[in-house]
Amino acid sequence: MYKLFLLLFLSISLQFSSQINTELLSNSSWTRVKFSMLDGSRDLNQRELGVLLWKITGNTLCVYSDPIFIEMKSCVDFNLEKRIMRTSKEAGYQIEKLTADSLVVTQRVDGEEAPDKIRKMWFVNNSLRISNFLKQYKNDTVITATREFTPSLKRNLVSEIADIYAKKEYSHDFTLNGNILIFPKKKIIRVEIDKEEGVKMNQVSVNLFKGTFEKNFYLWDLSGFENFEKVIIPYKYSSKVTNGIGEINRMGITFFNRNYIDFLPEFIVYIKDKKKSLQNFSKAVQAMNANKLDKAIEFFIETHEYDNTNTDALYNVASIATAQNKTDVACTALKRLKDLEQTEGTKLYNEKCSGK
């Protein structure tokens, strides 16, 4: 992307003198515990509450982004070149730290040197993470699963239910809230419904949902949960099928407690229309080239309003407005960058706008 704003970063020299034991990668499993950009800025393209699991087998890296549905993964082969796990000719992951317990990598793309565009991720060894959870709950017989510590499904039962709905005349509209109860020692599953909407009118469809989960105990990977009497997985499930055979209008399930609002950053990331955002960025560049600076600012602001992960647009607004001595406009853009936890934007805001 054409970037007009000159960012003032200190050059970053990576230390290659110390050796790492790359054999620690072989047949390993890692859970991401932290992520940011290389300069410490918030990574706007990653879900704040997302779970990411890396499993490395030989020279294959598989990335799991859903803690329940383990079949939802993407895998790529890589070549290990000194400290770099090269996944293609142009990209890969540079290993900054590797021990038996922890892994730190930066995502590298050829030609990208700006620290606010390079992702950094911290991982812990998955077996160590599970061991720590088990120590924490060693005296408990009942445990409520979380994104970080949960049984997982070997098959996506929700998609199987959708297939059945699509083949039969199961027109319905209902929402369920409750718990999936797993009894590892008894090898049984029960589905609780605490709150229901539209259930009585759609009992056949509801029974299909409950029955599919309750009869598939052996599809759950219960590694680490074998000694608990009961494992509780909170869920919310909604389904709408209006035309009977062949058409699913809406279906979805979320797991775990859903009171996330207290943990979300104050400034929420959104992408309303990526295409329009890029179109406005192009128009802004054209306006800059034509020396229509006010119009360029207008287009850059629209760029960011359609996609607030596009921080370059805000840096450009601040740059142009500063050159025009429009301090209020520049500081408004820098305040947005500060709200988005962008390191350089925060620094500039504090220097130029603090107290205004």
Image: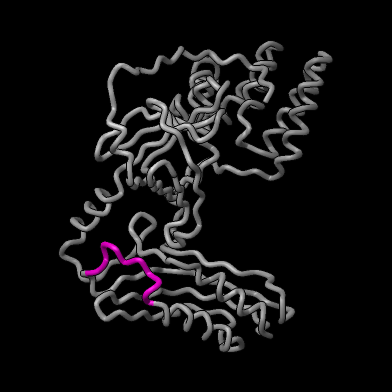
| Res 145 quadrant in image | bottom left
Q: Quadrant of the C terminus?
A: top right
Q: Does 119 sit left or right of 101 as displayed?
A: right
- In the displayed structure, would residue 216 be above or below residue 291? below
Which residue corresponds to the image point at 36% horizontal and 46% vertical from the top-left? 31
Q: Does residue 355 appear anywhere in the picture?
A: no
User: Which percent across, then down, holds residue 84?
Assistant: 42, 28
Viewer-closest of 234 and 231: 231
Q: Which image quadrant for residue 305?
A: top right
Lateral position of residue 355 relative to residue 140, left or right: right
Q: How many marks?
A: 0
* Residue at left offset 24%, top offset 48%: 128
Q: Which residue: 19% across, 67% down? A: 140
Q: Position of residue 85 (x, y in %)?
A: 43, 33
Q: Quadrant of the N terminus?
A: top right
Q: Residue 287, can we see it? A: yes
Q: Answer above or below: position of 27 versus 108.
A: below
Is 202 covered by the magenta stretch?
no
Residue 295, image x, y percentages: 80, 23
State which region is magenta.
Answer: 217-226
- Picture layout, residue 31 above or below residue 38: below
Q: Position of residue 212 (x, y in %)?
A: 48, 80
The quadrant in which residue 268 appears is top right
Q: Is residue 303 above or below residue 30?
A: above
Residue at the farthest left position: 139
Q: Is residue 76 left or right of residue 186?
A: right
Residue drawn at point x = 31 percent, y = 70 percent: 231
* Colour scheme in use: one colour
